[in-house]
Image: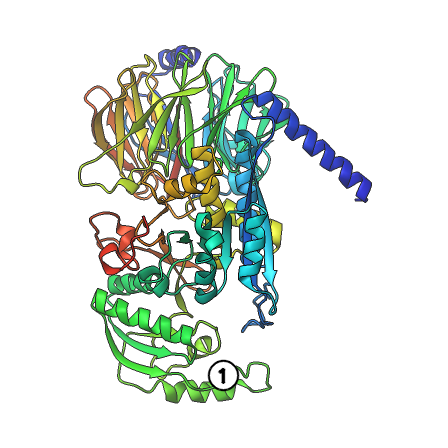
Amino acid sequence: MHHLRTALLGVCLLSPLGAHAYSVYVSSEKDNSITVVDGETLEVRQVVPVGQRPRGIALSKDGESLYVCTSDEDHIEVLDLKSLKVDHTLPSGPDPELLALGPQGRFLYVANEDDNMVTVVDVDKRTKVIEIQVGVEPEGMGVSPDGKWLVNTSETTNMAHFIDLSTHEVVGNVLVDQRPRVAQFTPDSRQVWVSSEIGGTVSVIDVAKREKVHVITFAIPGMRKELIQPVGIRITDDGSRAFIALGPAARVAVVDTKTFEVEKYLLVGQRVWNLAFAPDQSRMFTTNGVSNDMSVVDMERLKVLKSIPVGRLPWGVVVGP
Amino acid sequence: MNPAMSRSSDWIRILASLSLILSIGLVRAEPLSIPIGLISAERAEYIPLSSLEPRIEDEGLEGARQGILDNNTTGRFTGQSFDLLPVTLTSDQSPSDVVRDLIQRGVRLFLVDLPAADLLELADLPEAGDALLFNIGAMDDDLRTQGCRSNLLHTVPSRAMRADALAQYLAWKRWMRWFLVVGPLPEDRAFGAAIERAAKRFGAKIVVQKPWTFKAGASRTDSGHFNEQQLANSFTQVEDYDILLVADEADAFGAYLNYRTYRPRPIGGTQGLVATAWSGVTEQWGATQFQRRFLERTGRFMTPRDYAAWLAVRSIGEAATRTQTGEVSRLRQYLLGPDFKLAAFKGVPLSFRDWNGQMRQPILIVSPRILVSVSPQEGFLHQFSTLDTLGYDRPETECSIR
C-alpha cells in the first residue's frame, strides 16, 4: 500500500494539469463490464466490456493492470489500464469469485466457490501454482500485509481458514457466524476481521492466537434485524476506523477499532456490497448492487457526497491510477 | 478406472485429510460420530405428467446426502462426523419397528418422510422420548396447530405457509378475485382449505370455487388433447376472476388447465405460479453454487423434498458445530433457542418457531422456468419476524413445545 501510494504520488506529479488524479474501477456482474470513474470529478470516464459475470477485482502491484474474476468464464482477465483492453487471461480454477494479491504482487489467491478450493496463481508465469482444499463454498480472501497469512472464509462451513503462505497449508480454522463473506486484516497484521452475512456480525480474530476476541453486532432503529447483512470491510491505513458494508440495510457502519463500537451508520445505496478508499483516504466508494450505483463518502465529515450510476449489479470496487 | 486405482486414490484422499487433521491440531483423535436415520416409504411407481420431467426415485435421500457432505466438510475441521442411515420401508414393514431398532443401535436423530399418522406414531414411541425427529415430507397444517410434539420439528413448510406466501404475492399484484379449483384427493382439499384461509387473511375473494371431478391425462393418446381442450374450456366458463388457483397436489390435472381456460387468465397454486420451499430455478443468494453441486452429483435438480432433507441435516450440523456435542437434548435446546440461525440460500437466516417446531423460511414464488418473487412481500409486517406472516403464528396454535 505504501509503495502504491508513492507510485501514485509519482503519477500525480508527472500528470499534466487537469488530468484525473486517480480512477475508481467498478465491476458490473450483470453488464459484463468495468466502469471507470474519475475519482476527483466523479465523471464516468469509460465503460470497458469484459468477460461474463465479473465480480472480484484487484489492482496489480505496479498499478498497471486490473485482475478481474470473470466467474462464468472460469478464468481471470487481466485488463491493461492504459489501453483499457483485456491483455491476457490467467488460469483460476472454476467459478472464480474473489481474489487477493499477495504483498509481493507475484501470487494471486483465488476462491473457487464450486470445488471448495483456493487456487494460487503466478501472475508472471501465468500458471496455477497449487490448489488448497478448504471448506464448502470458499468466498472471502484476505492476505495479511506482512505476507504471512491468507485467510479464506467458507460460506457453508462457516469458518475462517488460516493458510500459511510459506507452506500453502491450512494450519488453523476459526468458527465464525453464518455465511462469512469477507476477510480483512488490520494494517498491523495482528487482527483479521470477518463479516458474516447471515449471522449479521463481524468477528474480530486475533491472528497470533487464532481466536475470536470480539464479535461486533449492529442495530439500526426501525430496521429489521435480518436485513443487516455485513459484507465488505475496509480499515483505514492508520488502523483507527473500520467501515463495514451492511448489504440490504443500505448502510455502512463506521466502527472504532479500539472499542469496537459503531460510531455512525452512513446511508448509502441498496445492497451495499464492497468498499474502496481513495489513495489519500479522503473518500470512500461503495458498490450498491440493487440501486445500481456507487456512493461516494467524504471520509473527514463522514457524509455521503453523491451517488453515481454505474453498470447493473455493481459488485467489486478498487481504486487505481 | 479399475477398482485398485480407485482404492489407491481413496487412500490418497484419506491420507490427505489425515494430514490436514494432524496439521490442524485442534481435532480430537477420534471424531465424534453423529448418526442420522432417514425413514421413508417405498413410493408407488410414479410417471411424471410431462415427458420433459425426470422420474425421481431418490427424492429426499439425495438432499440428505448433500447435507451430510456439507456437514462433514465442517466436521473435518471440528472433529465431528455425520453418517446417514437411510431406510426405505417396504409395505410389510412397520415404521415403529425400524425406528426402535435404530434407537437401540444408538441413533437419536431422524429425518422422517412419512404421512402424518405414521410420523406421530414414531414421535409417540416411548423409546423416542429422547430422540429428535425432523419432518421432511408431511405438509399437514394439523401437525403445526394441534398435533405438535416436543420431539418433532418440521423443515418442510406447511400448506398454510405456501398458501400465505402465494396470497401475499397476489395481494401485492392486486389480483384479489380468485377462482379456486380443488382436486379429488384429501391433500387437494387440504391445500384448498389453506388457500381459503389465506384469502381471508389477506383480503382476497374467492369468487368461484369448483371441485375437479374429471379424469384427465390423455397426453399419451393420439389426439388426446382434444378432450382436455374441450373439458377445460367448458369447466372454466364462470364469472370473471383475476387468477385461477388450482389445488392438485398429485399433479394430475392442474397443468391441463393452463392456456385452456375460457377467459385469458393466469393459473397458480399447485401448478403454474407456485409457492414452494425450493426450485431448480432459484440462483439468488449463492444458490447457483448449491444447485450446481447438487446437479453435478445427482444429475438432476434439487426438489423441495430434497431441500427439506438438506435443511434438517444442516440444522443438526449447525447445532452440533456450535454446541460441540451430539447430545440430543442440547441440540434441541439450541435449535429452538434464539441463537440458532441457518444460512440456506434464501437471503435471510432460517430458524425454528419455538411453539410448534416449524422452520420459518422465505417461500419462493416460481414459474416453471424462472423465479418470480419471494415472500414475505414488502409491507407485510410482524412484531417479531416478518417470516411469521407465513403460516400459523404463535397465537393461532394450541401448541407450545418449548
| Placement of the C terminus of chain A among the 4 image quadrants | top left
Give the amino acid type for the residue marked by disc 1 in the picture: Ala
Which residue is drawn at the image coordinates 52% and 32% (left, top)? Answer: A111
Find residue A297 and report its image quarter.
top left
**Residue B158 x %, y %:** 37, 61
Q: Secondary structure at mark 1?
A: loop
Residue at position x 35%, y 62% from top?
B147
Between A288 and A194, the one lying in front of the other is A194
Looking at the image, residue B58 sits to the left or right of residue A251; the answer is right
The number of discs equals 1
What is the crowding at mark 1: few (fewer than 14 residues within 10 Å), some, or many (at least 20)? some
The vertical placement of B254 against B81, above or below, is below
Q: How is the image coloured?
A: rainbow
Say whether residue A170 is visible: no
Give the percent coordinates (x, y) of residue B377: 28, 55
Residue at 39% over, 58% down? B157
Query: Which residue in the protein does label 1 denote?
Result: B216
Whether A129 is drawn above or below B197: the answer is above
Left of B119 or right of it: where is A280? Answer: left
Q: Which residue is pictured at 23% across the width and 70% down the height?
A: B204
| Mark 1 chain | B
Q: Is residue A23 left or right of residue B176?
A: right
Quadrant of the snapshot with the N terminus of chain A: top left
Q: Is residue A253 left or right of residue A161?
A: left
Of residue B232 and residue A68, the one placed in the foreground of this image is: B232
> Residue B135's image quarter?
bottom left
Residue A206, compared with residue A313, is above or below; it is above
